[in-house]
Image (spheres, rainbow, N blue to C red):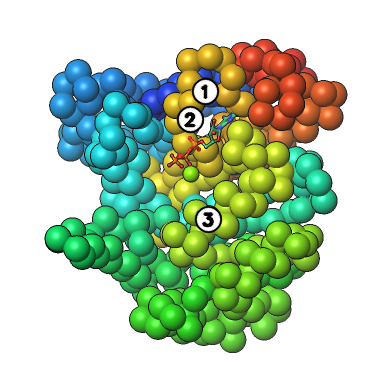
Amino acid sequence: MAQPIRIALIPGDGVGGEVLAEALPCLEWARNRGRALETVTFPYGADHYLATGETLPDSAFTDLRDHFDAILFGAVGDPRVPDGRHAEEILLRLRRDLELTVNFRPCPPFLSVARTVDIEVFRENTEGSYCLQGSTEVGRAVDLSVHTEPAVRRLLQAAFARAASLGRPLTLAHKANVLKHGHGLWMRVFEELRAAHPEVNARGMHADALLCALVQDPTPFGLIAADNYLGDLISDLCAAFIGGMGVAPSISFAPHRPHRCAVLAEPVHGSAPDIAGQGLANPVGMLLSTALLFRYLGWEPEAAALETAVSDALAAGAKTRDLGGTLSTAAMGRAIRERFS
Ligand code: ATP
Ligand code: MG
């Protein structure tokens, strides 16, 4: 019999656990349809850190890396840990040390609130300005931004491959006019891949002009590739086109598969301490991230059914407070699940 897919569940902090709870019946549903999967829940987050001083112990990291296929992640971040140390040592470490270079953030058209957008953001996920290297002295502070060719190439190759398969345009966001070294490297690899992919309509654009153009009219954009920092900003802006932070999904993966565990699905939003514990969080971002994970695992019928259920529930008026409705997190989860085919 095939070995089951092993999925690690990390609810984390704040609304992370509340939205992850709504994904669990979807995993159960996939299992009941014959998908061999096994889940293990890990306790890492602010409560665990404050109680034990542990963020993500090395033994847990190697267990995740070597004995699991995927991670389904809620969120980390807690006002009781003001320097965010535990979040860095849990989520940023998983992204970096599992080499999850590609952070894929689609904005599916069925979520569009104003104009119909269909944008997919490819964000580099492990380095750039988020490499956590720098120093603070009196009157002077430095944050390094480190870009390496293998990671840049992996991210751009994934974006070009997707653009080619969809026949959609690709825009690279950069500021190579100012960030001559780091974004110069991005431009060099981008131009090389552009020459190798004449079938892709690809262009580079200064990030400031791109943001302006996006706000004016997002409809002409297809795929957008960017480094970690710009990709973070651009994908949050794009989330606004589809209903906000509560609905935006993401999946991070290592195309070169350096370890058994090469994928982590999580909503774009963070732990949202302002609404945590009140049943106000929208579970849609988490559920659509679960659908992306199903698709990554090759479970296309389950991925499509979950996306259709979300789309149908929203079209029927099921809404949490962030979308102008009154449903609780759990009621929204139920409204979606009762539409499973
Ligand atoms: P991070 O640094 O982890 O990205 P953040 O500071 O960007 O976190 P979020 O936790 O993503 O903040 O929250 C940003 C805003 O979006 C908050 O006002 C929050 O209430 C809202 N928000 C986030 N997630 C949801 C959700 N699932 N449902 C409804 N509103 C949400
Ligand atoms: Mg954010």
Q: Is mark 2 in CB contact (under 8 Å) with mark 1?
A: yes
Q: Neighbour class for label 2 at 10 Å: few (<14), some, many (≥20)?
A: some
Label 1 lies in ligand 1 vicinity (Cβ under 8 Å): yes
List x then y, in percent, for residue 148. Answer: 33, 71
Tell me which amino acid carries mark 1: Ile
Q: Which mark is residue 275?
A: 1
Instruction: Kindly identify which residue carries mark 2.
Output: 272
Q: Which residue lies furthest to the right in this view?
A: 316
Asked if residue 20 is positioned above or below residue 193 in the image, the reply reads: above
Circle 3 sits in a helix, a strand or a loop, which is it? helix
Q: Which residue is drawn at 33% across and 46% down?
A: 92
Say which quadrant the C terminus sits in: top right
Q: Residue at x 34, y 29 (%)?
A: 79
Left or right, 38 with respect to 236, comes to left
Instruction: Kindly identify which residue carries mark 3.
Output: 233
Q: Residue 334 carries which label?
A: none
Distance Cα–Cα, label 3 vs label 2: 17 Å
Res 58 → quadrant: top left
Res 94 → quadrant: top left
List x then y, in percent, for residue 146. Answer: 31, 68
Label 2 lies in ligand 1 vicinity (Cβ under 8 Å): yes
Toward the viewer: 273 or 218?
A: 273
Tell me which amino acid carries mark 2: Ala
Q: Neighbour class for label 1 at 10 Å: few (<14), some, many (≥20)?
A: few
Task: Mark 3 or mark 2: name the one nearer the start of the chain.
Answer: 3
Quick check: can you spot residue 116?
yes
Q: Which residue is drawn at 16% across and 26% down?
A: 53
Left or right, 131 with respect to 250, comes to left
List x then y, in percent, for residue 264. Answer: 44, 41
